[in-house]
Amino acid sequence: VNQRLVVNAKLVRWHLMVAIAWLLLPMLVGIVLSFKLVWGDFLASTPWLTYGRLRFFHTNGVIYGWLSTSFVGLMYYMVPRLTGRALISEKLAWVCFVVWNAAILVGQIGLLAGVSQAVEYAEWGPVADVLFALSFVGMGINVFGTIFKSDEKHLFVSLWYILLGVSFTALNFVMANTLVAYVVPGAANAALEGLWIHNAVGMWITPIGTAIIYYLLTIILKRPIYSHGLSMIGFWSLALFYPLTGAHHYFFSPIPMWTQVIASATSVVLFATVVTVVTNVFATLRGRWHWITSHLPLRFLLFGVFGYMLTCTQGPFQAILQVQPIVHFTDWVVAHAHMALLGAFTFITTAMIYEIWPQVTGRALRSRQLGEWHFWLTFVGFYLLYFLPDTAAGLMQGFMWRAGLPLIESIVAAKPFWLARAISGCVIFSGQILFVLNLTGTCPWSPDAEREPLPESGAARESAAAAALATTPARG
Ligand code: HEM
Ligand code: HEM
């Protein structure tokens, strides 16, 4: 099979372009939110721009618009390449693309207009929910159909993760927008909402992100992953234990205590999952660490994996019943959420986009230098000006509250940290502008001479990667 022909480059390209637009817009809103926390009156008189509405716009925008849309685009790239056949229906994929975008637009504009429901990370109104659910299921049929119709006897581990993430999330999304939004009352509602929140990140973002990690590592290094067995242990521990952790969002609430204890214990067990992934990545990389100095996608990928490790080290720690009362409700959690979705999965997704962009557009990236600036602005902006200050602010707030100090004192004390976050937003955002300029090849101050050539001709590169995948035990 000609691996290049099975991928519909236009379909992938459109998903990625829309996704990047949804990285920029909610990020801009994230910056506005940060300034609002420093200056409470900033843009406070227009209802559409009030904190509550913009916060929903930010979180739903990055989760659905940015990460989910790029995941679909990247699955439409990985699944055909790993199964050796085109999607079962590219027409269906285009229809889903249109409905998916309609859902995002209706949902996001609705949020600004005040149409929302009280389910965290599922705040869109019912019309957007139905559109999104339909397009998600349509996408799922395409992905499942393609995998099941393929002649491959053994599934590469990325396909396992894709099957898990897509099937679980279809059910999880419908549950959140029906049972949690409108049917189940009281503490049971909170328990189900916890199930939804943690599985939105743990059984959608994490498995598709892990699928990308394994796939990308293999095609960049042109070498099989170190251990298929280890990847399977990671897979099954994620599938079995993640769904049990939902109540860790509501510790010391009216949810039955035994449920909370199970959530705390299984959260700690999940540390094993990240260890399997990270061990596998590091072992696969053996002898080639120095590649990260020159290979931009690999560097984004590895820093993303590092962010994933940090998230899942912090996660079990904050799920311990003795630690929870200190960090809950504080900026510590906001830092954790951003390490997960920005420091880990935005880096990993960006890595994959950089790697495949030349193949789906047929031209080299504009400039290596722009890519370097993009990386360093995002990395330094996030770690130094966002993650560390927010984590510190969280600890400070937690201890101030425990000392019985009035809330307003903790707000005043947090302001310098929040200002750092606002500045961080501007730094990170400028990095993303360079990302766009690099992909579109329109940067005026980057002379043609700096264009980075493709390491090998497209076809040679593709077939080498395909051969690496097809001949390795990792696939079986
Ligand atoms: C071993 C893995 C992990 C554990 C044990 C864990 C644990 C937790 C806990 C206990 C909270 C609640 C903190 C609180 O409100 O006091 C939390 C929040 C959060 N986690 Fe994780 N986490 C893990 C990995 C991840 C990953 C991989 C992601 C993203 C892909 C993620 C995304 C989030 C988000 C967005 C929140 C904020 C939710 C909110 O504010 O309601 N976490 N995590
Ligand atoms: C320019 C960069 C960004 C800035 C300045 C920013 C800022 C913010 C602010 C101020 C909040 C509200 C915190 C609060 O209410 O206490 C927030 C929440 C959130 N942001 Fe961002 N953000 C940025 C990028 C991102 C990205 C790229 C993602 C995901 C890919 C993301 C995901 C989230 C999530 C999940 C929450 C909710 C956290 C929670 O409830 O614990 N943000 N962000």
Image (tube, rainbow, N blue to C red):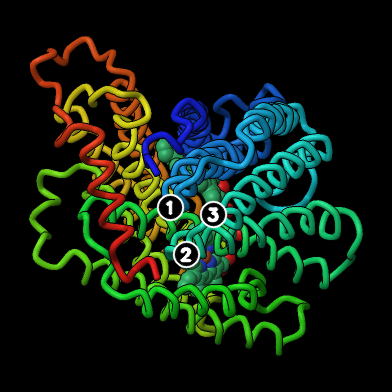
Q: Is residue 474 visible?
A: yes
- Callout 1: SS: helix
Sequence order check: which comes first, mark 1 or mark 2? 1
Taking the view exactly as shown, the residue that stands out farthest to the top is 444
Residue at left offset 66%, top offset 62%: 168
Q: Residue 54 appears at what percent x and percent y? A: 62, 34
Quadrant of the snapshot with the N terminus: top left
- Count of marks, rendered view: 3
Q: First in sequence: mark 3 or mark 2?
A: 3
Cα–Cα span, label 3 and label 1: 9 Å
Which quadrant is home to the C terminus?
bottom left
Q: Is residue 376 left or right of residue 396?
A: left
Mark in front: 3 vs 2:
3
Which residue in the structure is indicated by mark 3?
150
Residues at badges 1 and 2 in contact (C-beta under 8 Å)? yes
Q: Which residue is mark 1?
A: 82
Rendered residue at 48%/56% (across/down): 337
Residue ID at (64%, 37%): 89
* Amino acid type indicated by mark 1: Leu
